[in-house]
């Protein structure tokens, strides 16, 4: 129990430190890399909550591929952020952040403790899913059986969303590429 | 990039990364993993290759046309598995009738569906990287 508290405190402190560094740094490349490390620490956090699938996704998508895609997009950005003097906009931003954070913290007092058997989450469908995953579907990993079978429609929706997003980016960016690369090849020769 | 260490390491690592991706893909029933993670891992192998060598080299092993085809095929496969179940007389996307028993039907359905997710995710990531890496911003503005 104490070990868990120490690990969680360490991870939260690490995330907080990284977040402060992300806010402070002006170089775009260090912002991107720090965001990647933030995701990696978040993945460790999910592991300590026993959500291994989520942690895996966070590590591969958050820390891995999105960092690479940001780095690829970086070449179209200036290397450093502009410095801005403290003005009215910042005061609005600080007020909004404080109010939203306060509301979220206030709401978190109504949440049940993590991992308790009496929690509403474990009362209704979860039992059916866990029993059904063993008896009806025959797959040890409950997450997969929920994701692909019980909630197959949702996952289909997610896949179509990813597909649509990919097509949209291709329509916006890929249009000129085939022509340019051919032109470039011709020029290089 | 002209670093011999990076090039050799990439050549050595390329296959194991894809192998690990396939392991995550098809072992998702028994351990953590599944289509989304596997797709990202396989895409990472191709993107690593594109970064260390060049995008043109990567297009030789994953041509954009094949990339677009697989991108669409993944989403199609997912929907098609549901339609096959529909034809065989089951609700959409419930896989009971796909196999000889209910359990094997579920196994086959989940495997195919996850494979569709993996294909789409992997190829969307690769094509995103292609379009970012090749996009000619100035030319676009002049047009």
Image (cartoon, rainbow, N blue to C red):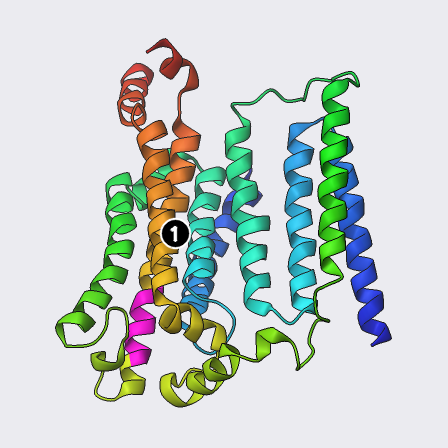
B77 up-or-down from A149: above or below: above
At 49% from the left and 83% from the top, the residue drawn is A130
Left or right of B136? Residue A10 is right
Q: Which of B45 and A129 is in front in this view?
A: A129
Q: Does the magenta stretch include residue B136?
A: no
Res. B103 image quadrant: bottom left
Residue B53, percent from left and from top:
45, 38
Residue A159 drawn at (x, y percent): 36, 54
Q: Is residue B63 above or below residue B107?
A: above
Q: Identify the residue shown where x is 54% and y is 36%.
A: A70
| Residue beneath disc 1 | B122
Few, some or many residues within 10 Å of mark 1 (<14, 14–19, 20+): many
| Horizontal arrangement in the rendering, residue B60 relative to residue B50 (left or right) | left
Tell me where the magenta segment starts and ends, as one range: B106-114
Residue under mark 1: which chain is it in?
A: B
Residue A63 in picture, x, y percent from top left: 59, 49
In the rendered image of this protein, does residue B92 appear above or below residue A177? below
Quadrant where the C terminus of chain A lies?
A: top left
Number of marks drawn: 1
Residue drawn where x is 26% and y is 49% of the image: B72
Would residue B2 be visible to someone looking at this image? no
Residue A7 seen from this side: yes
Residue B24 vs A166, above or below: the answer is below
Residue A14 or residue A96, whichever sits in front: A96
Secondary structure of the residue carrying numbered label 1: helix
Q: Nearer the viewer, residue A120 or B1?
A: A120
Give residue A118's quadrant in the image: bottom right
The secondary structure making up most of the magenta span is: helix
Q: Which of A186 and A150 is in front in this view?
A: A150
Picture residue at 29% right of the left edge, 56% below the top: B74
Report the side of A180 relative to A17 (left or right): left
Q: Position of residue B73 (x, y in %)?
A: 24, 54
């Amino acid at each position: 129990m104490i070990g868990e508290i120490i690990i969680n405190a360490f991870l939260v402190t690490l995330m907080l430190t990284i977040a402060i560094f992300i806010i402070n740094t002006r170089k775009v490349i260090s912002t991107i890399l720090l965001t990647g490390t933030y995701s990696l620490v978040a993945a460790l956090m999910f592991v300590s909550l026993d959500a291994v699938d989520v942690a895996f996704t966070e590590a591969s998508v958050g820390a891995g591929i999105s960092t690479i895609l940001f780095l690829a997009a970086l070449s179209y950005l200036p290397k450093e952020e502009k410095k801005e003097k403290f003005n009215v906009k910042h005061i609005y931003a600080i007020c909004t952040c404080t109010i939203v954070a306060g509301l979220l913290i206030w709401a978190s007092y109504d949440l049940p403790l993590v991992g308790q058997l009496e929690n509403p989450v474990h009362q209704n469908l979860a039992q059916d899913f866990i029993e059904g995953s063993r008896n009806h579907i025959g797959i040890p990993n409950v997450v997969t059986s929920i994701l692909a079978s019980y909630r197959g429609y949702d996952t289909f929706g997610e896949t179509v969303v990813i597909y649509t997003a990919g097509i949209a980016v291709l329509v916006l960016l890929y249009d000129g590429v085939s022509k340019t690369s051919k032109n470039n090849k011709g020029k290089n020769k | 990039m002209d670093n011999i260490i990076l090039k050799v390491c990439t050549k050595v690592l390329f296959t194991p990364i894809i192998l690990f991706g396939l392991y995550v893909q098809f072992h998702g029933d028994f351990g953590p993993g599944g289509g989304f993670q596997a797709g990202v891992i396989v895409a990472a192998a191709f993107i690593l290759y594109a970064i260390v060598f060049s995008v043109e080299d990567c297009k030789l092993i994953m041509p954009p046309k094949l990339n677009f085809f697989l991108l669409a095929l993944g989403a199609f496969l997912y929907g098609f598995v549901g339609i096959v179940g529909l034809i065989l007389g089951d609700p959409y996307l419930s896989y009971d009738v796909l196999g000889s028993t209910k359990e094997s039907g579920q196994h086959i359905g989940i495997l195919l569906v996850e494979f569709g997710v993996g294909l789409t995710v992997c190829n969307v990531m690769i094509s995103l990287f292609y379009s970012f890496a090749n996009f000619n911003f100035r030319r676009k503005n002049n047009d």
